[in-house]
Amino acid sequence: MAKEIPDLVAHARTGTGKGAARQSRRNGMVPGVVYGGGADPLPIEIPFNDLLAKLKAGRFRATLWNLKVEGQEDVRVIARDVQRDVVKDLPTHLDLMRLRRTSKVNLYIPVEFENVDGCPGDKQGGVLTVVRPEVELRVTAGDIPESITVDCSGMEIGDTLHISDVTLPEGAKPTIDRDFVLANMQAPSGLASQKDEDEEEVTETEVINQTAETVEGEDKE
């Protein structure tokens, strides 16, 4: 099932340059530019409060957006940069990159752990410890999975789930080139045995600074 792409509503901006950008900010907007996709750059502006709310929600630069601009066709974009005030740390400008449906992009996809209740480990009083509630995958912009599913029905105490145990959606590939841990079933004491490298697993950095190098199928600016 393809993930529903959230809307990012913007307005076409008249004028370019520092003067036009300052006027946009005085009007309660954050100026920006949309690049790539074989089309000319499009100056835009987004209401400050709307953008700030999305930034606070997290994953702004790791999310594929459906950009809606009045008078323009909707287009899929991803943020390449969000500039901030050095003192107030508030957004002052953003760069968005258009994506084709065939473009490859790095996105974090949620992991759903199914059939935990009633599995052998659960019946023995074990606890499923989730190491990665989401994983970074290289996916096609036109076919983004809503989540990946892991079947835990056969897990016993001491078992560990790796990314190799999961059937990924067609065309999706992990960005980490090793068999990393997703979760493990620990004994009630929390002392379930596992390899040292599994104990040291930590979640990767959540924010992705997308660049032309991390997105395939785009013309470099």
Image: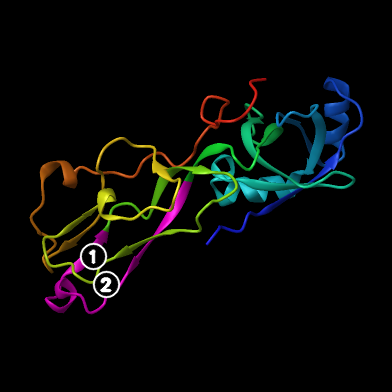
Q: Check residue 116 in the rendering and tell me which mark sits there, or answer none.
A: 2
Pick the residue in front: 155 or 184: 155
Picture coordinates of residue 17, whole percent (x, y): 84, 20
Picture coordinates of residue 156, whole percent (x, y): 13, 67
**Hey, which quadrant is residue 113 in on the image?**
bottom left
Q: For mark 1, does the 10 Å Cα neighbourhood hold few (<14), some (14 to 19), or many (20 or more) residues?
A: many
Left or right: residue 202 compared with residue 208: left
Q: Amino acid at mark 2?
A: Val
Q: For mark 2, does the 10 Å Cα neighbourhood hold few (<14), some (14 to 19), or many (20 or more) residues?
A: some
Image: 143 above or below 116: above
Q: Is residue 111 magenta?
A: yes
**Image point (83%, 21%), residue name:** 18
Q: Is residue 149 magenta?
A: no
**Image point (19%, 69%), residue name:** 154
Which residues lie in the magenta part?
A: 108-129
Left or right: residue 153 compared with residue 77: left
Question: Residues at badges 2 and 1 in contact (C-beta under 8 Å)?
Answer: yes
**Hey, which quadrant is residue 136 in on the image?**
top left
Image: 175 above or below 131: above
Instruction: From the image, tell me which residue sits under label 1.
Output: 128
Q: Secondary structure at mark 2?
A: loop
Picture coordinates of residue 133, whole percent (x, y): 37, 55
Q: Amino acid at mark 1?
A: Leu
**Image point (16%, 41%), residue name:** 197
Left or right: residue 52 compared with residue 159: right
